[in-house]
Image: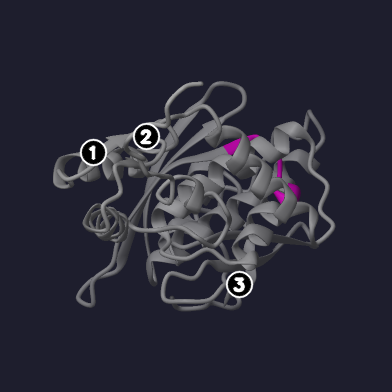
Amino acid sequence: MAAFPESLLIFDTTLRDGEQSPGCSMTQPEKLRVAQALAELGVDVIEAGFPAASRGDWESVNAVSREVQDATTVNIPDTVGYSGRHALRERVKHPGFELDDTEFNRVFEEFKALADRKKELFDGDIEALVLKTEGSAPGPWRLLELTTVATSAAPSKAFVRLGHTDGRMVERSAEGDGPVDAAFKAIEAATGIGVALRKFEVRAVTEGEDAQGEALVYVEYNLRTYRGSSVSTNIVESGAQAFLEVINRIELSQPPDAGQRDERGGAARIAQAAV
């Protein structure tokens, strides 16, 4: 009969499995404090995370490995893909959402990126990601880059780079009354579609200082009203994505031989909102 080992090694997975459930995200300093506390408690092996999941995880694993010397730090990727995806899929199913594999994979990638930016994640964050996936227009335009500059001494400026499904990449800059207005004008200049903005709203969809905001855009084009929405922790980006969504719907609604776009150089803004 084999003898029992003389020592017992304690293997802790708090920094990996403990963070896989939605709402349990930790910042890098928080992960480092937890790792140091585990080492002080005498934990022998600390599983620091899954560095391949995101740049934030990679930086956290390296910080723990560098700063915590009283325990062995490892990362084992064999179950994180399943455990993280399984937990999120179950949380998505709870409100009654049904996503195919492609939609779910997109939500999962956006969820990991959001977890890097936010200290806490709530059910509302997940619902917003799902609704964003279900309601987003399929193109043809995509926002590749958005840069805005806002000061009290001069008009705001925006630069956008858009990609089109036909292979075009268009860059435009514009000035406006605030960063959102400047971004809208730059998108109009890039796409060649001018609209009348009827309403622009922003509302918080989750809790906390780093809450996500949903931007709602209502525009009029050729006597028809279009509505777009987008969710992000960056309100200007959210507004730009919502505006681009209505531009996409307008372009997709045009006959193939329409070829004539409204290039008035700016929207007739009936209602404006300041951010």
On screen, residue 235 versus residue 257, left or right, reads left
Circle 1 sits in a helix, a strand or a loop, which is it?
helix
* Tags 1 and 2 touching, CB below 8 Å: yes
Q: Amino acid at mark 2?
A: Pro
> What amino acid is at disc 3?
Val
**What residue is pinned by disc 3?**
205
Task: Please state if 220 lies on the left or on the right of 189 as rendered.
Answer: right
Q: Residue at x 60, y 57 (%)?
A: 242
Q: CA distance from mark 2 to mark 3?
A: 30 Å
Between the residue at mark 1 and the residue at mark 3, the CA separation in whole angstroms equals: 33 Å
Q: Is residue 139 visible?
A: no
Q: Which mark is residue 51?
A: 2
Which residue was labeled with disc 1?
Answer: 62
Colour approach in the figure: one colour
Q: Say if residue 56 shows up in the picture.
A: yes
- Locate residue 195, reporting x and y percent: 63, 59
Magenta residue span:
134-141
Q: Is residue 153 magenta?
A: no
Secondary element under disc 3, as helix, strand or loop, is: loop
Check the picture and name the quadrant holding the C terminus. Answer: bottom left
As drawn, is 76 to the left or to the right of 139?
left
Q: Which residue occupies the extreme front position in the image?
A: 1
Please report whichever mark, 2 or 3, sits nearer to the chain's N-terminal start: 2
For label 1, count other residues whose C-alpha is less than 10 Å away and answer few (under 14), some (14-19) or many (20+): some
Residue placed most toward the observer, 36 or 83? 36
For the point 51% across and 78% down, the residue is: 273
In this rendering, position of residue 242 left or right of residue 72: right
Q: Quote the CA–CA distance across marks 1 and 2.
A: 8 Å
Give the amino acid at mark 1: Asn
Give the image location of residue 180, x and y in percent. Answer: 45, 65
**Residue at the image point whose x is 65% and y is 50% from the top:** 245
